Image: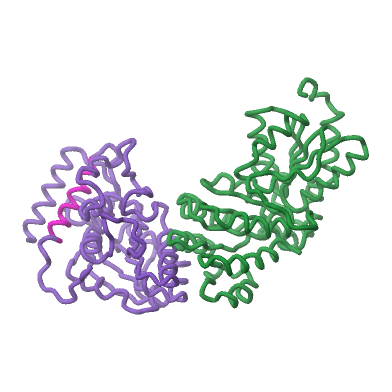
Chain colours: A green, B purple
């Protein structure tokens, strides 16, 4: 199941409980036949107009409502960035900007629909909480866990189905990285559905080589879990970050910001390189083709553990 | 608030208020940062009438839920708003002395959390969407609140204005009023150089009820605002023809009046011209 699908059914459940919840649509398709039929009085379609989507949602939130504003990530973060910044984030209003097609999840649609800079943009906006669930199970938990958030939320979802990381319901603690695997030799910090899956695969490969890789699912990119990062650096001495996002400015950048100022340690960032990718492919294919893969994580981990000797004295 | 539907004489109090607002604007423009004098002076009567007798707002309870929301989408006319808020009792008399003073509350574009300011504005083209969201929430929540959004005419070049203009009628927002301060100028020259007309037809074609008024005629503004919202489900656009720099002969209909830093000598001349004009009219 995709994070998008589970979000939609969870939103309807939330709306049953909370009369302040509104669904603000921007011609996404499917919301009008779902939420729009279930709660016609709390469904609004602004059309293909993302700047208006953000402004209208801000106005609604200022009146005490809890609008869930729906669009594609690239359109939220880039096209309507100023409305996001000034009207929603600047006013610290409880608008939930729920974006789909994150990263390469709209791979086949081409680079206009790739969102590889959205985390970098969203996490630099004032008051903004940024959450990237790793799978459908976590998405459902994240929607509930952020329902009472007093400020704005950027909830970054995919489009098509991605593998399940969790096979049963989990507790989602906002701002607290989920430790999925233990390990003492290095820490892999992952954000996004495929990156988390790749990190788990890398853990297995490394384990077979005798390398213990701790795996953190950094589902909340802002506020980032400083404690977990400091513990990772202190206890494992090296960090590999992996995300379905350009390798600068995103989660990996956020990790480096924390560690450089607290417990400096060697870090390797796995992300998409600078580029506008005129490529056709599925989500995982494009990630692998641009260098975000289990193999890249394993190679980076090996280099950190056996390589240049730069870790001497760190641990 | 009660709004007279038929009046002949302009209440002296509103005339006096408009004059005081203009004086305050000029004083704010005499600080080291200057201010957007022309576009502030052009919307004085609009603000005078709105705050004088149209908006249901309470200086002693600025946050009450059912209030009307005024949104200054043309945020660069902040000096006019501060002066109007002072006249309406939201700000202390001395507050305008702190315009653009470091550490103060009055910025060149309105900051949030200033009593009476609903949203920070300044980047053009945001206000109408905010107003639409407010109006929609009020309608769906059963609140009597209306949203009044004041925009510049140059601002209408922003595409986001038309996203909101297209949306509001489809959402049935009869409680939304867009006011265009049609002073005909923007920084580089006449707004007509970049083509706004036929403006009334444009708003009508988007499904709005349009009122074309003289934006300096207090009586006409009173009558117009008394009639809005004119339709339960259709928003209203008030196209107010104004003069940039209105009331100060030195600045009237002049490109250079967009942003002015008034030296003491210029301030004295401007105030002199303003008062002489006001005496002739009263």
**In the image: residue A288, left or right of residue A8:** right
Q: Which residues are magenta?
A: B14-30
**In the image: residue B52, left or right of residue A173:** left
Query: Residue A200 at what x, y percent from top left?
Result: 82, 47
As drawn, B93 above or below B63: above
Residue at x-position 31% and y-position 70%: B238
Residue at x-position 7% and y-position 61%: B282
Question: Main SS of the magenta segment?
Answer: helix
Query: Residue B24 at what x, y percent from top left?
Result: 20, 48
Query: Residue A68 at what x, y percent from top left?
Result: 56, 62
The answer to whether residue B248 is magenta is no
As drawn, B140 above or below B160: below
Viewer-nearest residue: B23 or B69: B69
The answer to whether residue B27 is magenta is yes
Inspect this view and state whether residue A79 appears: yes
Inspect this view and state whether residue B152 appears: no
Viewer-nearest residue: B117 or B191: B117
Query: Residue A160 at what x, y percent from top left?
Result: 74, 63
């Amino acid at each position: 199941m995709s994070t998008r699908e589970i979000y939609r059914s969870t939103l309807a459940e939330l709306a049953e409980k909370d009369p302040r919840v509104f669904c603000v649509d921007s011609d996404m398709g499917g919301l009008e036949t779902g939420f729009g039929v279930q709660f016609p009085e709390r469904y609004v379609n602004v059309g293909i107009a993302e700047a208006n989507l953000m402004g209208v949602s801000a106005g609604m939130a200022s009146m005490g409502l809890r609008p869930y504003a729906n669009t594609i990530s690239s359109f939220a973060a880039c096209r309507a960035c100023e409305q996001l910044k000034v009207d929603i984030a600047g006013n610290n209003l409880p608008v939930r900007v729920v974006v789909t097609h994150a990263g390469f999840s709209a791979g086949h649609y081409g680079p206009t629909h790739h969102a590889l800079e959205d985390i970098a943009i969203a996490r630099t906006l004032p008051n903004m909480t940024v959450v990237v669930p790793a799978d459908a199970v976590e998405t459902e938990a994240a929607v509930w866990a952020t329902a009472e958030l007093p400020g704005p939320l950027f909830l970054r979802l995919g489009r098509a189905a991605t593998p399940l990381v969790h096979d049963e319901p989990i507790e989602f603690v906002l701002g607290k990285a989920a430790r999925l695997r233990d390990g003492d030799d290095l820490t892999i910090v992952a954000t996004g559905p495929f990156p988390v899956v790749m990190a788990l695969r890398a853990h297995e490969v490394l384990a077979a080589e005798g390398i213990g890789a701790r795996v953190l699912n950094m589902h909340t990119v802002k506020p980032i879990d400083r404690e977990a990062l400091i513990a990772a650096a202190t206890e494992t001495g090296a960090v590999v970050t992996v995300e379905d996002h350009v390798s600068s400015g995103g989660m990996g950048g956020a990790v480096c910001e924390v560690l450089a100022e607290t417990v400096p340690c060697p870090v390797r960032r796995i992300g998409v390189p600078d580029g506008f990718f005129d490529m056709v492919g599925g989500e995982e294919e494009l990630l692998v083709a641009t260098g975000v893969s289990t193999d890249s994580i394993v190679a980076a981990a090996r280099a950190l553990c056996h390589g240049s000797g730069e870790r001497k004295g760190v641990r | 608030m009660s709004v007279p539907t038929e009046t002949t004489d302009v209440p002296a109090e509103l005339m006096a208020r408009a004059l005081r607002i203009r004086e305050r604007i000029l004083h704010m423009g005499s600080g080291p940062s200057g201010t957007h004098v022309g576009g502030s002076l052009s919307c004085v009567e609009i603000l005078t009438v709105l705050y004088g007798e149209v908006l249901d707002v309470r200086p002693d309870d600025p946050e009450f839920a059912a209030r009307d929301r005024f949104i200054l989408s043309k945020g660069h006319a902040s000096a006019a708003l501060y002066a109007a808020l002072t006249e309406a009792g939201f700000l202390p008399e001395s507050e305008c002395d702190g315009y653009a003073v470091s550490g103060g509350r009055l910025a060149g574009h309105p900051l949030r959390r200033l009593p009476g300011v609903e949203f920070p504005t300044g980047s053009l083209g945001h206000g109408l969407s905010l107003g639409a969201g407010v109006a929609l929430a009020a309608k769906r929540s059963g609140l009597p609140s209306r949203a009044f959004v004041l925009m510049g005419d140059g601002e209408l070049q922003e595409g986001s204005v038309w996203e909101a203009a297209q949306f509001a009628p489809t959402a049935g927002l009869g409680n939304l009023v867009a006011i265009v301060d049609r002073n005909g100028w923007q920084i580089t020259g006449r707004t007509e150089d970049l083509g706004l007309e036929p403006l009334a037809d444009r708003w009508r074609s988007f499904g709005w009820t349009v009122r074309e008024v003289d934006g300096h005629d207090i009586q006409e503004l009173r009558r117009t605002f008394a009639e809005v919202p004119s339709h339960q489900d259709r928003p209203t656009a008030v196209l107010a023809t104004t003069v940039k720099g209105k009331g100060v002969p030195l600045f009237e209909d002049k490109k250079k009046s967009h942003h002015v830093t008034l030296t003491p000598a210029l301030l004295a001349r401007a105030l002199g011209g303003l008062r002489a004009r006001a005496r002739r009219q009263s």
